[in-house]
Amino acid sequence: MSRQPFRLERGGRIDRSRPLTIRFDGETFTGYAGDTVASTLLANGVHLMGRSFKYHRPRGLLSVGTDEPNALLSADRGAGRVDPNNRASVLEAVDGLVTGSQNRWPSLAFDVGAVNDVLSPVFVAGFYYKTFMWPRSFWDKVYEPIIRAAAGLGVAPAGPDPDRYAHRHAHCDLLVVGAGPAGLAAALAAARSGKRVMLADEQAEPGGALLHDVTSTIDGVPAQDWVAQTIAALDAHENVVVLPRTTAFGYYNHNHVALVERITDHLPAGDTHGAPRERLWQVRAGEVVLATGSHERPLVFADNDRPGIMLAESLRILVNRYAVAPGREIVLATTGSSAYTVAADLKAAGLAVTIVDARLAVDCVADTAFAAERGITVLPGHTVVGSKGRLRVSGLIVAPLRADGSVGPRRTLACDCVGMSGGWTPAVHLFSQSRGKLAYDAGQDAFLPASHAQAERSAGACAGTYDLAACLAAGFAAGAQAASLDETRAFEASPARTGFQPMRVMPTDVDPGRVRAFVDFQNDVTAKDLKLAVREGFHSIEHVKRYTTTGMATDQGKTSNMNALGYVAGLLDKELPQVGTTTFRPPYTPVSFGALVGPSKGALFDPVRKTPIDSWAEANGAAFEPVSLWRRAWYFPEDGEDMHAAVARECAAVREGLGIFDASTLGKIEVVGPDAAEFMNRMYVNGWSKLAPGKCRYGLMLKEDGFILDDGVVARLAEDRFHVTTTTGGAARVLALMEDYLQTEWPDLDVFLTSVTEQWAVIALQGPKAREVLAPFVSDIDLSNEAMPHMSVREGYVCGVPTRLMRVSFTGELGYEVNVPADHALSVWETLYDAGRAHGITPYGTETMHVLRAEKGFIIVGQETDGTVTPDDVGLGGMVSKVKRDFVGMRSLARPDLVASGRKQLVGLETLDPNERLDEGAQIVVDPSAPVPVPMLGHVTSSYWSPACGRTIALALVADGRARMGETVHVTTPGGFARATIRNPVFVDAEGVRVHARDS
Amino acid sequence: MRRFNLASLLSEATRGHTGWGRQWRSPEPKASYDVIIVGGGGHGLGTAHYLAKVHGITNVAVLEKGWIGGGNTGRNTTIIRSNYLYDESAHLYEHSVKLWEGLSQDLNYNVMYSQRGVMMLAHNVHDVQVFKRHVYANRLNGVDNEWLTPEEAQAYCPPLNIDRSARYPVLGAALQRRGGTARHDAVAWGYARAADQRGVDIIQNCEVTGFRRDPATGAVTGVETTKGFIGAKRVGVVAAGHTSVIMERAGVRMPLQSFPLQALVSEPVKPVFPCVVMSNAVHAYISQSDKGELVIGAGTDQYVSYSQQGGLQISTHTLDAICEIFPRFSRMRMLRNWGGIVDVTPDRSPIIGKTPVPGLYVNCGWGTGGFKATPGSAHVFAHTLATGEPHPINAPFTLDRFRTGRLIDEAAAAAVAH
Amino acid sequence: MLEIRNQATRTAPFPLATETVKGTAIAPLPPRARLSLRLRPAEAARIGSVAGLPLDRPIGTFAAHDERRALRLGPDEWLVSGPADETDELGARIAGDLAGIVHALVDVSHRNCGLAVSGAQAEAALNAGCPLDLSLAAFPVGAATRTLLGKAEILLVRVDAACFEVECWRSFAEYVRTFLVEAARGT
Amino acid sequence: MLLITCPHCGPRPELEFRYGGEAHVARPADPSALDDREWSEFLFVRNNPKGVFAERWNHAHGCQRWFNALRDTHTDAFVTTYPAGTARPDMAAEDVR
């Protein structure tokens, strides 16, 4: 157990009364509540936390923020709760948390992959485009597997994720992103308006940079007290919601902002109480104030990536917020003023500090005076040319810059920690995502928000304002304006040390082509890689980025982009804006798939629609198949039966006795109004004016392009009322298409459409005994053949409940479709089933339905047809009205290719071997020995064992099929070809006698 | 120009890689060219390469509004396959796959065509019918494609969840082993370098603002650009999502609509996903890049847009499906989410060929699937531009098919179930 | 066979027990009579009301009279509901009121089913899947609209500050109920 | 996700809407009178501008009414929405700024 040798005696926002332990690479370390994993490790003197992507260089923490590129760890919270690539800098320390380093073997300290570092002269940017091409077959088998295994950082989770994730849609008048000084002031200003305010911040507690500011005062009180007062003030407003641990990661159209809230990861495993791990917030905000702060820039010099070399402000955070000494002997290398504040705080915490300032002495007089007052040594006008150490920095090599720009003699400053500050980059990510335009501000060397695309304001450091009082005032003004309050307010606050001289790459005394000065740490992109890219003609920053991969690591270039852009601009001798800024894409920081998926998994991935009879089917052993969102009974196996046997038995039962089938999923639309028949005439290929009430007719519907869209039986209930059925999958599509035509093309028609798919459950009774079994339960309807012939509809009662009873058949047998109100369906089904048992009633599923209709040559839309089939193609050309002036799709039927010869037509197929069942989808050829590409005639659309025929049967679409009756063709099989004969597609009862069965 | 190979790479390594020159020049436009190609994506640059290499036409300029490869070439999920149903499509995409197979060597630029296999999952009986139809048709067309049982599919792609109780169980899969992925940026750069080597001028930051036509014949005589007028005997427009905008400047209305298409990648992880998996039923496709990122594609947003930005709901919907099929990825994180602009024709097949304007040719309408076709598309379009007549492979992909009704509708052929 | 009339029992598409999660109660509602009424807006304005229910309320609200309600879902669409045993009576009354006027009246009593969602967190639970602004200001008591809950279409009615009624098509009931329970857990 | 103002229901999230492509493409009164080219233009050829576009939307999960919108396809900003069957308003993107 460690004793935290680098923990400072006093200070910090950690809770020393709540110690905790975490594990890292098998060792146990102690820390306190309020620590991150990084601060815990550093408190214990552990700086080596990771290995870089390409060269496997030893790396430590660079930043304590979300911009951390190096210290990426796996986090293990128990079974199934393991995930890679967590930033140690923001990963909250939780008692019992197990972490591990990544991308190293066999250990972090000794990593074989570091051989890449030795080979780095070869492995420069884009090297793989230039080699690995010979021999050709080696790419897949040798080169690529090696490259892939070397890349990739952490290891993907191994099993399903046991955690729950929540979603929340929210609306507010004002969303403030970032609870630093500007964001807090904005929320404070808006709070009193009474409007709904949301304030989101990615850190565990609000306050932003003020949480590590121990010297500033605001309006006379210490900054951290001001934070506490402000939070208390906001909490007192019911209209304000403060969301800590919540990152706004995506700014989408029309002020739609996505945030992710981390709810349980900071809690010990036993304390989560079933709460979701994370919550995705989708906020529609009237106004947005972005107060997202800024990121510090590293300095680019040789070997600037050793563990112990960090961003300067991060050292200040470690000391002031976490009470951790990142080292005892610290050198701060800087090109700007903010590092002096860091130095003062480090010194105040008892650490030895030296400042190396690349600015000439005359350019940093005020800063050096400030340092001198505090007894801090400053080397102004010095560049950094290298560092020493291997797994931890042991010295910084510096050299004076001469007036002529040359570099003087080197000297090494011994140290165990380095802070670097290359200036600041406003975090304009969300602003840029909102499609606001950025403009380059040369004075600040930064891209700043210029013109807005949405109802948005940027305030504070993200808009280039660094002084505390100015940030507060800007935030307040933004919040007030966003809340339509005409208010401003001045704040009194300690002045901040701001300003820097941008320096893309530190001047050096050696051949810059030989040193490795890292720009993008994680992806191991060096300044010389950028130079190589420019040399090779990659001049757009997007090209440079893609060629070198700079800015494409998991930190998305937060620390590297400005250095890269500035350096490339310098190489090209162009202004920065001419080289461009890379586009910022969501998410701001990586977001778990789980949070994005939310509840939509398992049973909630997609609704499973069930019919009212589903429970009966399940209880009776049905196998189910998914059909669009529905689950339908597929077949009802009896003990030991496979699908083939069950379907054969079910088919026989329907042909010889009685089958009962749940057809409830059929789409149903009630078409009502004086113009109903006219509307139907326009929507369907056939005519409806002459269909008498009480009659049914099979209808066929096209899309405007002339191809079959849907079909179904239509019953005319009254002059002005049709009960239209559609296919199961087509129900929504057909209704939508009808509504579209009705509302937008023919608004003059007096017709209304109502979906009744789920009002009416449909029980199909099919088979010679259908009438006999049904009759006793029907009242008010005469079922006799004369009174109710095939294709008729009657309204009355069955089992005492209202019914729309249709005498229709999709099987070729005497049949009824009993429509009953859905809540009554199960009861009616059970009554009919019980009564039918004496007659051998057999429940059947969709597979049997398919076989029975195929025996009759009936098509199924979507199986015999795809989106390229006309009525004539499937032998239904006769249905197309010759007298109607127009209907949807009619004109297209006359297009040249739709009337050309050689179209595929529906035929039947019989294999020479009556037991051979063809594959649905099999292709049909004349000559199987023809050279590739073998010309194809068509394909098998349906294929079954037909109990009625005692053999297999198939339907197929075959070019000029109707002219090929009797021809023998060859059909593909998994192993070769089968021979088959083309025939008429009706296999059973071609005369259609059975459906007209006389009264028994 | 230096050839790329291990020897040159090692030799440069010893001298700090200072000997590499530009991969392509950055010339000012000449007064006129034999052929101008509008659009510096993979298809356009490839067209220039094949014009020079196959047809000996080197007085060619590629005009790019921004930076080459910056459109859909650099924004797609890099899936390559040729297992299309219809003869016309199968021949086109197979032509492309064959060119992919030798492309690195042809260009002397490693485009990393990785034939790791593309697997399409069948989730219901209808999918099975449709995919088997593809498998059989492909085989007769000389395109590899095979049917796998769920167990075989999982053996090929271990993260696959083949639990039969899943909301959309895997009933089988069609696998094209020769399919795979490639490094998209390298395709643009490789073609640019190869074309440049043969004398083609690649002109970036040059937007075509209008067309000049012969008043007598109506034929195109050149283009107005932000760098001035440039004469041309023939002009080929290969502008993907912006084709309608460009063609309107030539007075031609196209049967095209431009939609946002989104994709996303995860943080990089060690190899975990060996192939490409597509699931049409749940609208998702996924592979893992050589860098380790899971590369995930979604469907288009529903509305026409040139904003290169879509709604979050498209990505979340896709991830729903990905996590349902691959539950282990729930704790992976989305690293980057972006959008492109895809131009979609009514039958979702491309238009490659002549236009009503003499001398003006167009290659567009690749929708969500253009990357895979890059070499084949470029090769036949070069033929069309060089000879004035379509190559037999692109002959069916005319603008006129919308008049005759002879559509090539692969999506319709996979019609949704009854 | 009239003697067996009305003997068939009604079977609800979800369990009849109320589920309470983190203070949010999700309770099945008893069956109701529901009639979809379609009528041109001009005619509706002229008629004023049917079955004692005003037709001229703003789209997205409902009018109530005794146990009857008329939800105005669109310019020409109302969902009229009442006690389950009044379906025929309600239909006849409306048809009578609209005699001679072009309209469509379709019985959808069994198409929809309802759940009550109540409790202080009801709004938050619904917002797990409903993208609308459900604050009292934006969606007050009396509001009624078609919208979405996750991947299902619902009818959402606010009957009280802390009580909503959610109706959906019957086959989506299991999904909607499961979704709401999960959503309540996530509040 | 877009925020779309339904003329009947007010601003609602895009999730509730279904897109319908270009507006004001009236179905010919007598399709048979059109030749193949004219008919194919009606079927397939659409304006696809980068800029203000008149398009159709259906409030599918709301009032279920179709309506039209002017939207700038470059920025996705709506200029206005208006009922189906009414003429395209004479407005440009600048009018709403």
Image (cartoon, grey):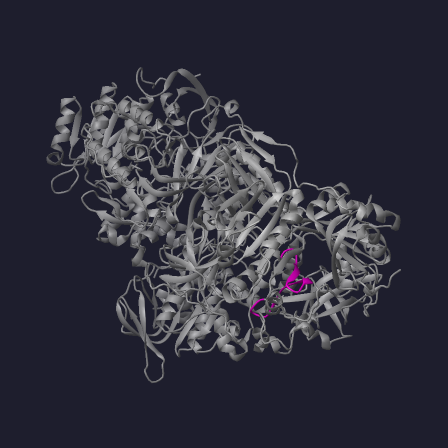
In the rendered view, tell whether residue A456 sits above or below residue B85.
above
- Pick the front one: A985 or A910: A985
- Side of A102 relative to A438 (left or right): right
Q: Determine the image quadrant of residue B115.
A: bottom right
In the rendered view, tell whether residue A248 sits above or below residue B247.
above
- Pick the front one: B31 or B407: B407
- Pick the front one: C93 or A17: C93
- Side of C31 relative to A177 (left or right): right
Residue A697: x and y in percent read 71, 66
Disc count in the image?
Answer: 0
By secondary structure, the bulk of the magenta-drawn segment is best described as: strand
Residue D96: x and y in percent read 31, 55
- Pick the front one: C95 or A269: C95
Residue C41: x and y in percent read 49, 57
Q: Residue furthest bottom?
A: B216
Quadrant of the rendering where the C terminus of chain A is positioned: bottom right
Q: Is-magenta flag for residue A717?
A: yes
Kindly identify the residue that appears in the image at 64 percent across and 47 percent down: C109
Q: Is residue B107 visible?
A: yes
Q: Is residue A644 visible?
A: no
- Side of A258 relative to A837 (left or right): left
Residue A688: x and y in percent read 66, 69
Q: Determine the image quadrant of residue B131.
A: bottom right
Quadrant of the rendering where the N terminus of chain A is positioned: top left
Q: Which residues are magenta?
A: A703-729
Q: Is-magenta flag for residue A916?
A: no
